[in-house]
Structures are given as C-alpha cells and as structure tokens.
Image (cartoon, grey):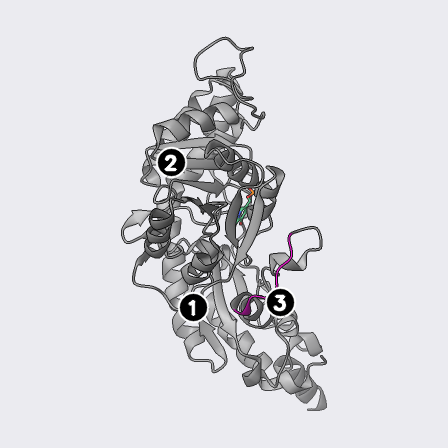
Amino acid sequence: MQRELYRSRRMSLPAILGGEPVRKEPYPSWPIYDKREEELLLKALRSGRWSVGGKLQEEFERKFAEFQHAKHALLCVNGTAALKIALKAMGLKPGDEVIVPAYTFIATATSALDLGLRVVYADIDPESYTIDPESVRKLITEKTRVIIPVHVAGRPADLDALKEIAEERSLKILEDAAQAHGAEWRGRRVGAIGDAGIFSFYQSKNITCGEGGAITTNSDELADKIWSLRNVGRPRTGPWYEHRLYGWNYRITEFQAAVLLAQLERAPGLMERRERGARILDELLMQVDGIDPLKRDKRVTRHAYHLYIFKYDRREFSNLPKQKFVEALRAEGIPCSPGYRPLYDYPFLPSSSPLPNVEKASREEAVWIPQYVLLSEKRDLEDVQEAIEKIKRHADKIPR
Ligand SMILES: Cc1ncc(COP(=O)(O)O)c(C=O)c1O
C-alpha cells in the first residue's frame, strides 16, 4: 500500500523533482534517409566527378530553384557562406549598413561583419517573432543598403511591408530562409521574393545533407556573380586560372548534392506531416492557460515549421522562469529549447539598447520544439500537453 502510494506520487511529480517522465520513448529521429540516398551516393561516387562539373549538383540546383519558385539556385558550403556570397554579390562595400533582426542565428550578423559591413539591429513583431517593418523604417540611414528579414522557424516575415520600404528607399532585400524550405508568402515560395534568399542544409534542417547552403534569386546578373564568388572568382566560362572577382572556395561536393536530391524528393510529404502536427499541437496547447501558440498570419500560405514556437507566460506557472520551465519540460522527455538570445548580448557583436519585443521573446516567452516532433502521431503530441500540465500543477515546488 505504502509502496503503491510512493509509486503514484513519483508518477505524478514532475521528472525534474524526481518523478517519472511523461515520455520515455524518443520522438522520430532526424535526419532520415533510405535506399534513395544510398543509390544516389553510389551514383556520385561512380561518376568520377566529385566537385566542379558534377551532374547531381546541377540537377539539384535546377530542381531546388523550381521548388522555391526561383529562377536560379546555387549551392555552396553552408548557409553562413551563402549569406556572405549573396551580400558580396549585391555589391556591398565596407561601411555599408545592413538591417537584421536582433532575434536570429548569429550568422545573419557575422556574415555581414566578415565583409566589413555595419550591422544594425531591428526589433521583431511580437506576434510572429520576425523582423518588424516599422522598426526597420526607423533605422534607415544614407548608408543602409540591405534589409535581411529572417524567416524564423520557417515562417515568412512580412515581405509585403518590407518590399514597400525597400522600393521607397532603394534598398535590397536578402531573405534569410535558412529555416524556411518550402515556406510560402501569399502562395509564392520564399527565397526570390526579395532580391535573393539563402538556405541552410545543416543536419537539423528540414532538407539536409549534413552541411550545405544555397542562394536563390531571379536575377541572371546576381546568379552569375554568385556562381563566380563561390568558385574563387572564376568566370562561368574561361580559363581555370582566371579570377575576375575576389571570391572564395565555397563549393559543395557531389556527395552532398546526392543526399540533397533524395531529401528534396521526400520534402513535400514531410511538409504536409509537419503542418498536420502543428495544427494538432496548436489545438492541444491552446487549451492550457499560460501557453499560447504563435498566431498564424493568413498571408503565410505555408509555414515550413522548422521549429514549432509557443509563448510561455510564467504568471500562470507560479512565476517559474522560462529557463526552468524548459529544463522541466526536457526532463519530461519533450525536446525543446529556450531559443535565441538577443544578438546584442554577445560582447564581440555590435551592441544596442534592449529592443522590447526581442527581450520579451528571448528572455521570457519563446519556447521552441524541433521539427521532428511534428512528424509524430497525435498521441505523441498529447504527451507535450500532458507534460506541460504536470509542470504547471507543481510549478510552485520547482526550485528557482
Ligand atoms: C536563421 C539562420 N541563418 C543562417 C544560418 C546559417 O546556416 P549554416 O549553419 O548552414 O551556416 C542558420 C543555420 O542554423 C539559421 O538558422
């Protein structure tokens, strides 16, 4: 009897306080592959063209451009290099200014800093966590050249408002779509809605080959420059030792393209599953007071859901800080993260006075769940709700 009681107490206590976790089974693993990757990798191996001139690279570039509704897609080593190449191709010079959201991955800023550009931080919209166009407007100076909206989590930023500003002030837009493969803004896929866009194929990404990146654009002129910049400044046609631009060796290999081609074939089905998982999770989490899934803008006709983000309100959880809530949720077997810190936190990056919505999202509100969780079934997603409710019931007992 005593033991039964002890057992049920352990069952109902949060795992962070020594109880049983809600979930002991892992969520679907990522990355995934099957025979198709193996087949294409062998094809790459046997082709004898492992770098420049590889046919699978060309095939992927053609198919990925089509997938993203862009005229061109050009592969390179990673998303960070893609940002650097794109900014250089846009003709930016040291001292020119770029506006980035302070709520993003560090590479959005470091790629620009590497080129001697000045990085200026904009605030984010409190409902979408993407760059706030009104904040951008206030930061424009004579030196501003490019706005870099980041499609955080796979949700497109407000490209209508940003394009309007860019046109008014003769600025360029470089979409950081590192997390937004297949995402759509009013029926059009991201990446070439602005002047150019970049993607990452890092192993956590929805389409991956371990490490990789791509730049998309509708401009023939930019595409030629990008081709050259990633290939040590060589022209598309001409002798091997001719270098017309200051470029880099940021080329990818045929093996990565082989994996990417297989991943791209699987992408549409997985996109549907993530959307379905996100709808289920929205319904489940909306029932919990103090948890608010990010609202969906009607113009986002497809969310890539690289991440599922919800807002956490500590007031409904006995004032438990976000960081502790995330620790407690992880202990229950739910993969999650507190997400980005504001970029101005890092002492080696440009500083800024605190931006209110970036502060709130990063320090208090935003909780991220990785995309592979959305690939699971309804009963697996119910565990997320159950774990949160359990933590809530005992939040006053969790040490701060
Ligand atoms: C928003 C954003 N920008 C840029 C990058 C950089 O991509 P990579 O890691 O492939 O260099 C990432 C990748 O994590 C990202 O999430």
Q: Picture coordinates of residue 293 (x, y %)? A: 44, 70
Q: Around disc 2, counting alpha carbons within 10 Å, would you say few (fewer than 14), some (14 to 19), or many (20 or more)?
A: many
Q: Picture coordinates of residue 261 (x, y %)? A: 42, 33
State the residue position of label 2.
217
Which image quarter: residue 300? bottom left
* Residue placed furthest toward the bottom: 1
| Separation of marks 3 and 2 at Cα, in angstroms | 40 Å
Which image quarter: residue 20? bottom right
Taking 374 as reference, is 81 above or below it? above
Q: Is residue 254 left or right of residue 400?
A: left
| Separation of marks 1 and 3 at Cα, in angstroms | 25 Å
- What is the secondary structure assignment of the residue under circle 3? helix
- What is the three-letter code of the residue carrying label 3? Arg
- What is the three-letter code of the residue carrying label 2? Thr
Q: Of callouts 3 and 2, which one flags the residue occurring earlier in the amino acid sequence?
A: 2
Q: Around disc 3, counting alpha carbons within 10 Å, would you say few (fewer than 14), some (14 to 19), or many (20 or more)?
A: some
Q: Of callouts 2 and 1, which one flags the residue occurring earlier in the amino acid sequence?
A: 1
State the residue position of label 1.
127
Which range is magenta? 350-356
Q: Which mark lies nearer to you, 1 or 3? A: 1
CB-based contact (under 8 Å), mark 2 and mark 1: no
